[in-house]
Image (tube, coloured by chain):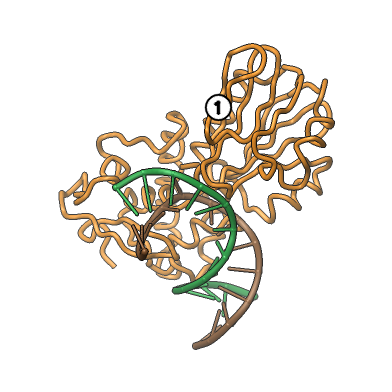
Chain colours: A orange, B brown, C green
Amino acid sequence: MPELPDVEGFRRKFNRHAKGQKVNRVRAAEASATRNTSPQALGRALRHRRFLGADRHGKWLLARTDGPTVVFHFGMTGSLAWSGEPGPVELERHDRLAFELGVGSLVYRSQRKLGGVWLARSGDEERAITGDLGPDADKIDMSTFVELMSSRKAGVKAALMDQKMLAGIGNELSDEVLWRARLHPSTSCTRFSDRELGRLHETMTSTIREANRHGRIPPKRGWLESVRDEHAPKCPRCQAPIRRGKAAGRTAYWCPRCQPA
DNA sequence: CCTAATGTTTGTGC
DNA sequence: AGCACAAACATTAG
């Protein structure tokens, strides 16, 4: 689930509930959730610190405090939950970490343990944690996008998902964008004119903007996401059977009629 | 039992 | 170097 729009939803949730609040305590149900620190050290570093706003870069959430920054990544199954219960929250099965803030608790939840929580004390440390990230997919301007994409030979889906080029697009979002742009996921970027790349940028931007409003890729009518979980999905545009195959090392969904090779 | 799953990293080979 | 592909990570659902 967590791609750019999901993390954007977590960011808004963080700012709505946790921003401005002091951390009383950090409670760990699962020690391995903390990656470059321990639950104890995280608690010591944050106790009596105040959460400022959270930033997002791609799929990374950066929670600022008046001390160090708490860095979240959600892997394939993570999420951020808010409980308005004052005092300790009842932790559920996959809750790994709870930040008790007095007015409620912020809960880092993850079914599998692919993501995690880091502590960064400087911008350099932050970059060491997130790795090399390209500009955020929601903020990149058209000419930069066209320049980056036209220097690529990879398939367009692989290029869109490359976090070093462009940060925030994952498997499902790339399928949604390419379906809306009517481009086959394996088409080499070398095949596109600047004009076509400009149109792809426009499609990508409007897709992300609308998904961000929902805090996820909306399974709405007229979106590929609305049929993705069906046994025999049909293209919401032309009703052709959706093809499901490997592209860029992942399971890709595309319409063979709207998105020919 | 097996397979696949929204992500990232690492290794191999062309 | 750039790219494609596979495996690994840990866990659950079907």
Name the residue: 57% across, 33% down: A95
Q: Foreground residue, A224 or A151?
A: A224
Q: Amino acid at mark 1?
A: Ala
Q: Which residue is mark 1?
A: A81
Q: Is residue A63 above or below residue A140?
A: above
Q: Is residue A203 visible?
A: yes
Secondary element under disc 1, as helix, strand or loop, is strand
Q: Quadrant of residue B12?
A: bottom right
Count how many numbered circles sit on residues in the image.
1
Q: Position of residue A24 (x, y in %)?
A: 76, 19
Question: Does residue A176 appear to the left or right of A160 in the view shown?
Answer: left
Residue located 49% across and 37% down the image: A5
Horizontal arrangement in the rendering, residue C5 relative to residue A71 (left or right): left
Image coordinates for residue A50, horizontal then vertical, percent: 78, 21
Q: Numbered disc 1: what chain?
A: A
**In the rendering, at what x and y percent does residue A172 appear?**
41, 49
Is residue A143 in view from this perspective? no
Query: Vertical placement of A250 versus A83: above or below?
Result: below
Residue at 78 percent of width and 43 percent of height: A37
> For this view, does A98 lie left or right of residue A109?
right
Q: Residue at x 65, y 39 (%)?
A: A30
Taking the image as shown, residue A54 lies to the left or right of residue A137, namely right
Front in this rendered view, residue A63 or A161: A63
Location of the C terminus of chain A by quadrant is: bottom left
Residue A237 image point, x, y percent: 20, 46
Residue A225 position (above or below residue A68): below
Is A140 above or below relative to A153?
A: above
